Image (spheres, grey):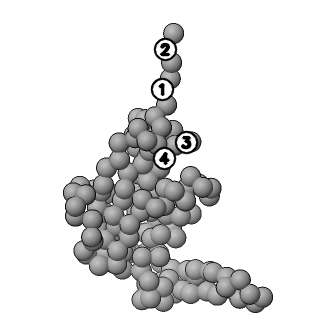
Amino acid sequence: MKMTRSVSAEQARREWFVIDAEGKILGRLATEIASRLRGKHKPSWSPNADTGDYIIVINAEKVAVTGRKEENKQYYRHTGYPGGLRHRSLGKLRAHAPERIIEAAVKGMIPHNPLGRQMLTKLKVYAGSSHPHSAQQPAVLELG
């Protein structure tokens, strides 16, 4: 009788990848990033363990959106005070903090629990074309 072997988070082999977001569609990019953060592309994937890879996204300010999302898509946050709901359009958020666009899209696609929050720590997003993770020797990941 064969036993199914589960890979724990400590036993998982994690790799580093760099993704260039320039010209990529936001939703399609975010789904691929979320899948790789979870580790669903690996044969050792398990829904209760963090077996995913580290993902570095560069050129976040140049990610593309379709239609009129630049003006119409809104990002909401609450200050914690009564009447403290604030919103910002995608265009204004791109000018202020372009990293948050990709972070918010990926955050909505991973589990909303402590394991999902742990997976999000493996996502590194940078507005420009440089990143401080060259010591990890990340491989370039080309998305179709």
In the orientation shown, which residue stands out farthest toward the top?
1
Could you classify mark 3 by the number of other residues whose Cα lies within 10 Å: few (under 14), some (14-19), or many (20 or more)?
Answer: few
Disc 3 and disc 1: Cα gap in Å? 14 Å
The residue indicated by pointer 2 is 2
The residue indicated by pointer 3 is 47
Above or below, 24 relative to 48: below
The residue indicated by pointer 1 is 5
User: Which label was assigned to residue 76?
Assistant: none
User: Which label was assigned to residue 50?
Assistant: 4
Looking at the rendered image, the quarter that the C terminus falls into is bottom left
Q: Which amino acid does label 3 sit on?
A: Pro
- Under circle 1, the secondary element is loop
Disc 1 and disc 2: Cα gap in Å? 9 Å
Q: What residue type is labelled 4?
A: Asp
Could you classify mark 2 by the number of other residues whose Cα lies within 10 Å: few (under 14), some (14-19), or many (20 or more)?
Answer: few
Q: Going by the image, does 24 lie left or right of 80?
A: left
Looking at the image, tell me whether mark 3 or mark 1 is earlier in sequence order: 1
Q: Which amino acid does label 2 sit on?
A: Lys
